[in-house]
């Protein structure tokens, strides 16, 4: 059941610091226990900065969405106009980040956020979404499969200095 006060909305440029803090916190919560602390800290310090988030928020080709419940931010998603490697042709949007605060998992928010992601991608003319998910993140992979994504290969994702294997998943729109 979805919380009655759920709202999905675009993130504003002036919220870059809030987005960076949420992104770092949710990544740390999701992957901290399974990663070397030094590699995790390096990844967080170089990836989730207010400046990097501000760049994405100022790019009209990128989409950043907040999920809020009664005005409290509980998750976010970010989409970029990128191709997987190897490229699959025109019409690609990458779902680069999709995270909820741990306490809000399983409460019906993620499906609504995914609906908003797909709606935005379609509005921008995308024919498919793609993402990568760590092979050890079984819960996320199952969720993405329920949303129509299918595994189509693997890729490497670097956390700090640690190369990890991710599944590459595609979803036709």
Image (spheres, helix red, strand yellow):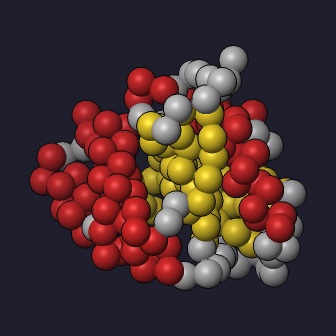
If the image is split into quadrants, where does the C terminus sit? bottom right
Q: Is residue 163 visible?
A: no
Residue at the (42%, 79%) spot, across then down = 55
Residue 146, how many percent across, how many down?
75, 33
* Placement of 87 over or under 120, stated as above or below: below
Residue 172, how many percent across, how many down?
85, 57
Q: Quadrant of residue 78?
A: bottom right
Q: Quadrant of residue 109?
A: top right
Residue at the (64%, 80%) spot, across then down = 61
Residue 43, how many percent across, how many down?
26, 61
* Placement of 33 over or under 157, stated as above or below: above
If the image is split into quadrants, where does the N terminus sit? top right
Q: Nearer the viewer, residue 47 or 64?
A: 64
Residue at the (30%, 69%) spot, across then down = 50
Residue at the (70%, 78%) spot, across then down = 87
Q: For the view shown, which residue lies furthest in the top direction?
A: 1
| Count of numbered tags | 0
């Amino acid at each position: 059941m979805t919380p009655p006060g759920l709202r999905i909305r675009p993130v504003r440029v002036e919220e870059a610091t809030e987005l960076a803090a949420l992104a770092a916190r949710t990544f740390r919560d999701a992957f901290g226990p399974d990663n070397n602390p030094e590699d995790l800290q390096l990844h967080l310090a170089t990836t989730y900065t207010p400046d990097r988030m501000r760049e994405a928020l100022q790019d009209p080709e990128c989409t950043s969405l907040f999920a809020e419940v009664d005005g409290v931010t509980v998750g976010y998603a970010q989409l970029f106009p990128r191709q997987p490697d190897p490229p699959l042709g025109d019409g690609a949007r990458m779902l680069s980040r999709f995270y909820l605060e741990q306490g809000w998992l399983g409460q019906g928010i993620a499906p609504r956020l995914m609906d908003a992601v797909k709606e935005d991608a379609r509005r921008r003319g995308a024919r498919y979404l793609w993402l990568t998910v760590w092979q050890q993140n079984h819960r996320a992979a199952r969720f993405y499969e329920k949303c129509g994504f299918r595994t189509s290969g693997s890729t490497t994702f670097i956390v700090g200095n640690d190369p990890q294997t991710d599944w590459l998943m595609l979803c036709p729109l």
